[in-house]
Image (cartoon, rainbow, N blue to C red):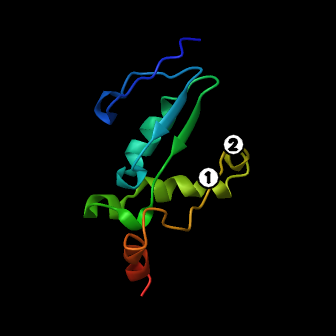
Amino acid sequence: MNEQLEIVPLAYMRGRSFNDSIVLVGEAENLTEDHIKLLLARCGENTRIFFDGDVQQVDSAIFKDKNGLKLLLNLHNSPVYSKIFGTVPLVKIERSLVASCADYLDNV
């Protein structure tokens, strides 16, 4: 076990393999379907991958049309992959009362 932390931009993922690793993907709401498939395909033996994102906070139209995070949620419906897939919905804004205004306005 190397016990190393490596930060890798998405642009440098092709051709890589992650074995015995934990992969953390932040801001996943801004990934396309192709990005999600690329990241999943990099995961080798004994690797866990975690995606963090909020589909309500998509940055541009390209991510709204072919949103990778929404595609990933389809794994819930698979008889095979639903066994290795899970979600943790976080429903409360923890930054501040002012920051929670954004969530309120999304739902008005």
Horizontally, residue 98 falls left or right of residue 48, namely: left
The residue under label 2 is 84
Q: Earlier in the sequence, mark 2 or mark 1?
A: 1
What residue is at 48 percent from the left and 49 percent from the top? 52
Considering depth in this image, is 52 or 81 the residue closer to the camera? 52
Q: Can you say whether 101 is above or below 85 in the image?
A: below
Mark 2 or 1: the one toward you = 2
Res 12 → quadrant:
top left
Name the residue rendered at 40%, 55% in the picture.
Answer: 29
Which residue is label 1 attached to?
Answer: 75
Q: Where residue 6 appears, x then y in whole percent?
A: 41, 23
Determine crowd level at label 2: few under 14, some 14-19, many 20+ residues with C-alpha closer than 10 A: few
Q: Residue 36: image x %, image y %? A: 44, 44
| Quarter that holds the N terminus | top right
Front in this rendered view, residue 6 or 100: 100
Observer-nearest of 91 and 32: 91
Image spot of residue 56 (x, y percent): 41, 68
Rendering quarter of residue 107: bottom left
Count of numbered marks: 2
Residue displayed at 36% across by 51% down: 32
In the rendered image of this protein, does residue 82 appear above or below residue 58? above
Residue 100 coordinates in the image, percent (x, y) = 43, 73
Residue at mark 2 to residue at mark 1: CA–CA distance: 9 Å
| Residue type highlighted by circle 2 | Ile
Helix, strand or loop status at disc 1: helix
